[in-house]
Amino acid sequence: MMDMEIVGDVTSLDPELLQLPEVSPSALRTSFQFAEELFSQWLSLPDTGRLVKSLIHDAKVGSPLNASCNSCTSNGTGGSPLPSIFPAGSVPPLSPRSSSGSPRTMKQRSSPSSLGSPLKLVSEPVREVIPQFYFQNGRPPPNDLREQCLSRINDLFSESMDGLQVHEFKSLTKEICKLPSFFSTTLFKKINTTCTGTVTRDAFIKYWVDNNMLTDDIGTKIYEVLKQPDCKYLTQADFKPILRELLATHPGLEFLQSTPEFQERYAETVIYRIFYYINRSGNGHLTLRELKRGNLISAMQHADEEEDINKVLRYFSYEHFYVIYCKFWELDTDHDFLIDKENLIRYGNHALTYRIVDRIFSQVPRKFISKIEGKMGYEDFVYFMLAEEDKSSEPSLEYWFKCIDLDGNGVLTRNEMQFFYEEQLHRMECMGQEPVLFEDILCQLVDMISPEREDYITLRDFKGCKLSGHVFNILFNLNKFMAFETRDPFLIRQQEREDPTLTEWDRFAHREYIRLSMEEDGEDASNGSAEVWDESLEAPF
């Protein structure tokens, strides 16, 4: 026999032709002579000889060799394979075989059903068409919505074929664009880029309908109308046009039209409050994500619908502006619109410690807008006052956490808290009050915050606790610390039940506005309300 290695498919062998007893897999592995004898007998079979000759012929003519099995008809079954003599898992390598007449080749070329395969024919999976979900220029409006909108636009422009002027644009702003009415001038100028004084029907359709703004949410609409072209954020200047129109048109702000300087201060205060709460990054760039996550949009809609601007507590209340501005004016003794450390230390009847005031003027919690060394501007004061009077808000917690975190490592340790409390302890001793040792205070703070680790407190710990604001009062605001120690829990719960939506800032601004308005009525009224104010001013609610 020629000296060559042939690999065969044992599933096509007839065990009766080999005339060998059944063997175990272990016997094949350990007995090389037995395997040799078995292989020799296989080579002596007639079909094997024909197979070898066929493979040699294919190799000579250059035909591709096929490892599939040649037909073995000795059992008379034709195309059905013969049973293997080897147990499962111990099958030796297959021998190469001719591509002609092989049952395996026939199986590959024939359909499963023609060979009587027990396997079911699996059909090709149906491809599901995924609808388009991203549109570079916004999702196009449905045809019925588009036609309905165009019909209403035609009605609004029917009496002014040459276009609408700015004072006629308010109905279009509210009905078609679904924006607050005080956006009408800004929207008008956005479309009237040529400054012709009118906006035609075609120009409006091109800007609003063709740009697919019909299907945008209200936040995206406001963002697109306010922001500058090719800009990816809003700045404080972008809000000034809508606030000018609000001041000019809102019935609750008509009384300010004779005092333009206070109109400007009101607009500035509203903008500062917006950026304090909404611009969480603190970089002065208000993104679309920040705009949608905040409550500014609902506040704008409320301001557009409510005639009493003081009922719009979020951002637009005139009473809130009045309280902030008067507080700043009281501290700014030389009225240069700047205050220093000595001015700020008088805030809240000298409630703050010198150490916390030093940290504020070191500009750790926030960089001052004022460029004058050692001076705080009006915007800086607005941020400070909102943080001081509402320590339940996240911006306030972040503000004061940075102040207490002396090394800036993101955690408050025992030594850092003790550094600020030492001045509180000294002030209590000077006032003849019974001092509370820091060890007792530290236990109280840990119980209030319940931090993940007792050796330090993180900002995350503060944000997860409703009493976090009182921790800061204990460390650097003596008046509020003492008020917290003598608080009436029943009064607090009663006020929370009366209006649970009010924040600490809302309650403080309401009390302070009453005090300031009474002072304007006369000195006697101011003195008569002093004791009442002193008790409620520093209340922890």
Image: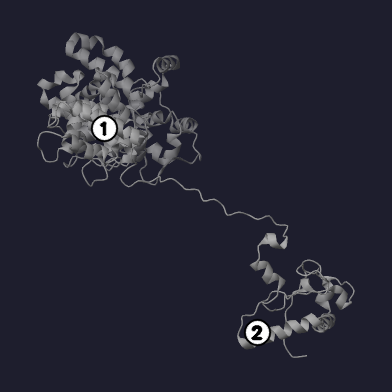
**In this view of the protein, which residue sits in the foreground, 113 or 147?**
113
Left or right of 407, for residue 350: left
| Res. 105 image quadrant | bottom right
Identify the amino acid type marked 2: Asp
**In this view of the protein, which residue sits in the foreground, 489 or 413?**
489
Mark yes or no: residue 229 visible.
yes
Point 21% across, 32% down: residue:
342
Residue identifier under label 1? 150
| Residue 210 on image: x %, y % | 26, 40
**In this view of the protein, which residue sits in the foreground, 17 or 225?**
17
Point 24% across, 17% down: residue:
307
Mark yes or no: residue 176 visible.
no
| Residue 446 on image: x %, y % | 48, 33
Mark 1 Cα within 10 Å, few/some/many (few <14, many 20+)?
Answer: some
The numbered mark, 1 or 2, whose residue comes first in the sequence reads 2
Identify the amino acid type marked 1: Leu
Residue identifier under label 2? 58
Label 2 element class: helix
